[in-house]
Image: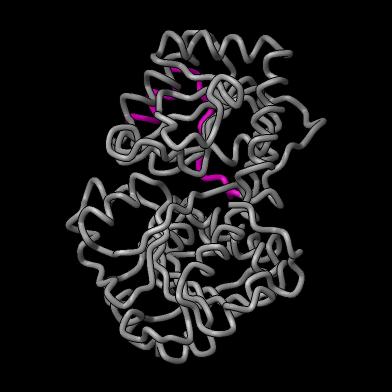
Amino acid sequence: MKFVLFYHSLVSDWNHGNAHFLRGVVSELLARGHEVEVFEPEDGWSRTQLVAEHGTAPIEEFERRFPRLSSRTYDLDALVLEEAVDGADVVLVHEWNAPALVAGLGRLASKQRRLLFHDTHHRAATAPHEMARFDLSGYDGVLAFGEAVRQRYLERGWCDRVWTWHEAADTRVFMPHPGAKREGDLVWIGNWGDDERTRELSEFLIDPVRELGLSARIHGVRYPRSALAELARAGIDYRGWLPNHRAPEVFARFAATVHVPRRPYVRALPGIPTIRVFEALACGIPLVCAPWPDDEGLFTPGADYLVAANGAEMRERLREVVHDKELAGTLARHGLHTIRSRHTCAHRVDELMSILGELAAPTDLHDPRALRGPHEPRNSLHV
């Protein structure tokens, strides 16, 4: 089959976590013998910020690291949508796109292809007026990255057919690196978060590191001066942006990491961990989480990772995983097994194929060989 994807960026992951998942999905589709084209705006915010801060070197590094992955940049005013989707069996459109693009693709709805909207953000709950700008009347359905987001679409009548399609780890990239030389106790890879978790980062990350005297490093972007000063006072080494494909080798050099969810995901959209949890567990690093409700049963808290209800508990949990090698090893193995058995990009592509099978698809999509792709085994759907 031919897939055409419209995303904010495949190339840049600067403050753009969806690029992680998109790369894994595209890699999996290509591995199964499908044809994939990805379109991204030439003036996309993430790509523009990346180049402004680091030049073109990160894009060149991406091309070397992912030689099979490429995108076509476009100017929306000059893009001919009919040509872009010509021959496509499936078109996926991410929510971080211009409403005009979303609407234009909807007007090209055809029985010869499936058109799906992909939402991976909390705006459905926190800024519904922004999501209401999207005209989804021509779409076959929505892929929502959590059940809570799916329910928002149904409640507000934005679309009649909505499926939960969680993010996952690209295990071609995210895997343990045994034998790496230890460089410190704790590493955290994450962006500041537009004041969505300022208090939580102090309570569950910065204060415990300072109180325990841990050797810690942070990677991420958009840290204000006040945050950088706070990190310095805690003795935390701030290293700025890290290309996401290098995260596994960094995880391997530290004893533990933490997950500090943004407030909207805890309060308004329970059950959505964001992709950082999947990727950390896929790398086999012990993980301690600030509170978040795993309402959908994606993981086994206490076995895949430890949970700290407050800053004091985070301090104790970190003390345990940093100094108890047996506990750390057990957590790492259990979390890694959970990812590999349930939460890889291969699993999500299986789910996507199942969703396509549910739709009133064109004749070629009814052929199981078309759904599998020429190199996909017959019994590969796990949903």
Snapshot quadrant of residue 377? bottom right
Where residue 203 appears, x then y in whole percent? 37, 18
* Horizontal and vertical percent position of residue 271: 41, 37
- Foreground residue, 75 or 109? 109
Residue, x 43% and y 74% (percent of image)?
42
Using residue 179 as the reference point, say whether residue 312 is left or right of it: left
Q: Which percent across, then down, holds residue 368?
A: 66, 73
- In the image shown, does 181 or 168 lie closer to the viewer? 168
Q: Position of residue 249 (x, y in %)?
A: 70, 39
119 or 113: nearer the viewer: 113
Horizontal side of residue 336 vs 82, given as left or right? right
Residue drawn at the location 52% of the way across and 8% of the way down: 316
Extreme-right residue of the structure: 179
- In the displayed structure, 294 sits above or below 113; it is above
Residue found 70% across the figure and 58% down from its top: 380
**The magenta segment:** 225-244
Lateral position of residue 247 relative to residue 47, left or right: right
Quadrant that contains the N terminus:
bottom right
Q: Is residue 322 magenta?
A: no
Magenta-colored stretch includes residue 229: yes
Residue 276 to residue 82: above or below:
above
